[in-house]
Image: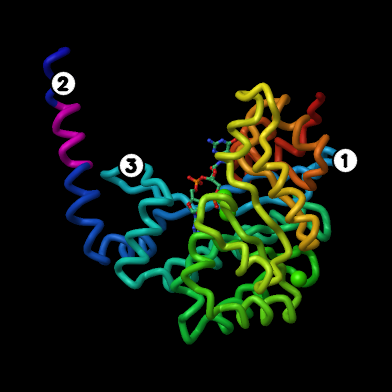
């Protein structure tokens, strides 16, 4: 039976590799996945550093493929991007959130922040503004504060999109630069785009506690954010030591496995913001 296990393991692995390399490269698989309801969303709590209470959630997409299994978003977003399927996929994401909105409204307090990731090619789509407005209109009025997140990497690529960020602000949405610290010298864009939130990449957060001296780069990033009047969110907080270090330095919000993993709607309901101590 070790042998059969091995055979099945190898077969399974091969099948999985086949899917990831061949089938997923044809756009059909993503469109089929949308049609068959294989995508779903999870919500990761974001915690207020002062009150240590949940201030909102970030929405993260998942793809449960019947053969390849759970495909990570980093992978399928890249596939969708390559196949020009970001727009239908993001519209589907908006639908999934809207479908949950009634329940979410009861779990999250009024004014709760709802972070939604945007892929760069969507910004160029002629339907971008319509898509965003339709999404906002599909949610209970005035309950959620929408925050659209774009990575620092993509921000540099999309430097002509700055008017879109202004537009989003005028529409009452907020904007965040994601994965800050992983792109290359986006400082000039940071000043030009006037985004509301700066999300400190978990690479920085990871290094807290590893070095005996505190991280000078992270200190500088926090100073910079303050000078640009940006609200800071630390991502990937996994230990109480990291949380304490960040809180002591005035980071506004914390997100990470130490507080909660990305949760299904049901899990989010029972999580309810368990108190953490330092
Ligand atoms: P992101 O926007 O930076 O999202 C945070 C990622 O960090 C998530 O990975 C989350 O599960 C993970 N994470 C959160 N806390 C911790 C922690 O304490 N430790 C560690 N090691 N990881 C943590 P996930 O869900 O795999 O998503 C990966 C990326 O895929 C996201 O990074 C985002 O760029 C993209 N993505 C996810 N959902 C969507 C979506 O709906 N639309 C778009 N355009 N991109 C998405
Ligand atoms: Ca994000
Ligand atoms: Ca991030
Ligand atoms: Ca603003």
Looking at marks 3 and 1 on the same chain, the residue that comes earlier in the sequence is marked by: 1
Secondary structure at numbered mark 2: helix
Instruction: Identify the residue shown where x is 82% and y is 53%.
Output: 109
Q: Which mark is residue 172?
A: none
The image shows residue 243, relative to residue 34, as above or below, that is: above
The image shows residue 136, relative to residue 150, as above or below, that is: below
Q: Which mark is residue 69?
A: 3
Q: Quadrant of ligand 4?
A: bottom right
Instruction: Identify the residue shown where x is 59% and y is 46%.
Output: 201
Q: Does the magenta segment cover residue 15? A: yes
Secondary structure at numbered mark 3: strand
Looking at marks 1 and 2 on the same chain, the residue that comes earlier in the sequence is marked by: 2
User: What range of the chain is rendered magenta?
Assistant: 8-16
Distance, label 1 to label 2, CA atoms, is 51 Å
Mark 1 is surrounded, within 10 Å at the Cα level, by few (under 14), some (14 to 19) or many (20 or more) other residues, namely few
Which residue, given by chain and number where applicable, does mark 1 sit on? 51
Could you say where residue 245 lies in the image, as x and y percent from the top left? 76, 31
Q: Tag count in the figure?
A: 3
The response on whether ligand 1 sits within 8 Å of label 3 is no
As drawn, is 266 to the left or to the right of 40? right
């Amino acid at each position: 039976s070790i042998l059969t296990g091995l055979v099945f393991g190898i077969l399974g692995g091969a099948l999985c590799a086949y899917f990831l390399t061949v089938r997923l490269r044809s756009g059909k698989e993503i469109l089929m996945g949308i049609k068959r309801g294989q995508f779903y969303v999870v919500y990761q709590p974001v915690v207020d550093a002062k009150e240590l209470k949940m201030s909102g959630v970030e929405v993260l997409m998942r793809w449960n493929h019947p053969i390849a299994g759970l495909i990570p978003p980093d992978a399928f977003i890249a596939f969708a991007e390559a196949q020009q399927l970001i727009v239908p996929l993001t519209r589907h994401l908006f639908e999934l959130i809207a479908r949950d909105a009634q329940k979410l409204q009861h779990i999250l307090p009024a004014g709760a922040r709802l972070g939604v990731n945007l892929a760069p090619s969507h910004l160029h789509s002629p339907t971008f503004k319509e898509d965003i407005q339709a999404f906002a209109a599909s949610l209970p009025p005035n309950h959620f504060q929408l925050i659209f997140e774009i990575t620092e990497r993509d921000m540099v690529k999309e430097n002509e999109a700055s008017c879109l960020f202004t537009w989003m602000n005028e529409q009452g949405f907020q904007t965040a630069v994601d994965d800050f610290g992983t792109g290359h010298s986006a400082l000039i864009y940071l000043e030009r785009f006037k985004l509301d939130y700066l999300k400190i990449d978990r690479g920085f957060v990871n290094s807290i506690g590893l070095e005996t001296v505190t991280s000078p780069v992270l200190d500088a990033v926090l100073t910079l954010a303050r000078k640009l009047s940006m609200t800071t969110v630390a991502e990937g907080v996994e230990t109480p030591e990291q949380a304490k270090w960040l809180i002591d330095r005035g980071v506004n919000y914390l997100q990470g496995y130490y507080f909660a993993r990305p949760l299904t709607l049901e899990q989010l309901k029972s999580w309810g913001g368990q108190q953490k101590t330092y």
